[in-house]
Image (cartoon, rainbow, N blue to C red):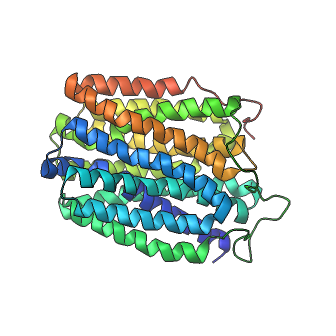
Amino acid sequence: MTPAFMLGATGFALIAVCYGFARFAFGLFLPQIDADLSLSASLSGLISGGAFLGYCIAIIISAFATEKFGPRRVAVAAAIVAALGMAGIALAPSPVWLAVSVLLAGSSTGLASPPMAAAVAKIIRLARQGAMNTIINAGTSAGVVLSGPVALALGGEWRFAFAGFAICALFLVFAVLVTLPGYGDGGNNACESTPADASTDGAKGLPRLNGDLMRLIAATFLTGAASTAIWSFGSKLVKLRLDWGHSGAGMLWIAIGAAGIAGALAGTLVARFGLDRIHRLFLAAIALGIVLVGASFTVPVLAVAGGVLFGAAYIMLTGVYLVWGIRALPDRPATGLMTGFLTLAVGQTAGAPIFGLLMDYISADCAVLVFAILAMAAGALQAEKRNFQPA
């Protein structure tokens, strides 16, 4: 196997475990967790926001730690933190313990992304970096789609599910140690890149906030906030609207995750049609997906269709933001990725508790409509066209 294949497979698996299991599976099991620990919608929204808050803190640390220590050490830390956080969720006896564990598990996602971007920049030739980054990023969907059958098989036994997820994270520690390059290492000896085309993270400190980055920050904040309607409350919405239990929620998660595999095409589609067109198209798909899953008129086939739209659109958009951030800071790929993904998570940190409050104190219909509008509003933010023209 080539170094590029090993990097892609390891990165895909790490993202699947950290994002699909440690971060987004919590929303899948939330109705059962709520029942066992007596959580209200407002409290579960706050706890869900903790996963995104942990991400916000960790991705800043990760971007600078990757520059200082290299991708391998930071990616190993991501796998270990994911294992500890999910083990904590599995053992949680109280809401406080659960909140701390969810925050820790969510931190693993922030740790995982920057070292993967840096590793790709070291090992993969420049012309293929966008495609490889979006393939690795699509690992989120694999984790989401796998968590659905786990929910179906275990009948909502969320403690056993998270214990199994924690074991998967521990196995990845060894894969990362073998595959990823360390500090100052060009990766495995047969790396594809050359000194002429390999990006590096030689610059230090905070990036300069130019117009491109400011628009990226605004767009990712709104998209992140909107996405919590499904990631944090999708299971609760289908339980409310369709009286679906863990089996129905598991099917929704399978639909979301399976459709999200399409996000691996983000880099190719951006190169072909341009970032702005793809950005607006899939934001509209996210908004429609939120409405189809959560509106009072939904029926089973519409809810599943909404999950498909949301899954494909969300992973596609994270790929778009990944490409946007890296292109905005081509000499600092880990920091470029960090900028967009950080504000995506800041939006999710704010969005989850707000959605819960709207559900508790106004109505689910109001929450769904407001968050669909947030997704559409993000489409008003455009990348600077002279930098992001299609090839």
Describe residue 373's horizontal placement relative to residue 182 as left or right.
left
> Which residue is located at x 20 percent, y 64 percent?
154
Q: How many marks?
A: 0
User: In x, y percent, where is residue 258?
Assistant: 41, 53
Residue 12 visible: yes
User: In x, y percent, where is residue 255?
Assistant: 35, 49
User: In x, y percent, where is residue 269?
Assistant: 62, 43
Relative to 170, residue 11 above or below: above
Residue 250 visible: no
> Which residue is located at x 56 percent, y 58 percent?
136
Which part of the image, by quadrant, shows the N terminus? bottom right
Describe residue 294's horizontal placement relative to residue 2 as left or right.
left
Q: Quadrant of residue 354?
A: top left
Describe residue 154's horizontal placement relative to residue 269 as left or right.
left
Residue furthest right as drawn: 196
Which part of the image, by quadrant, shows the C terminus? top right
User: In x, y percent, where is residue 349?
Assistant: 41, 39
> Which residue is located at x 64 percent, y 36 percent?
275
Relative to 288, residue 185 above or below: below
Q: Please tell me which residue lies in front, 256 or 97.
A: 97
Describe residue 38's horizontal placement relative to residue 201 as left or right.
left
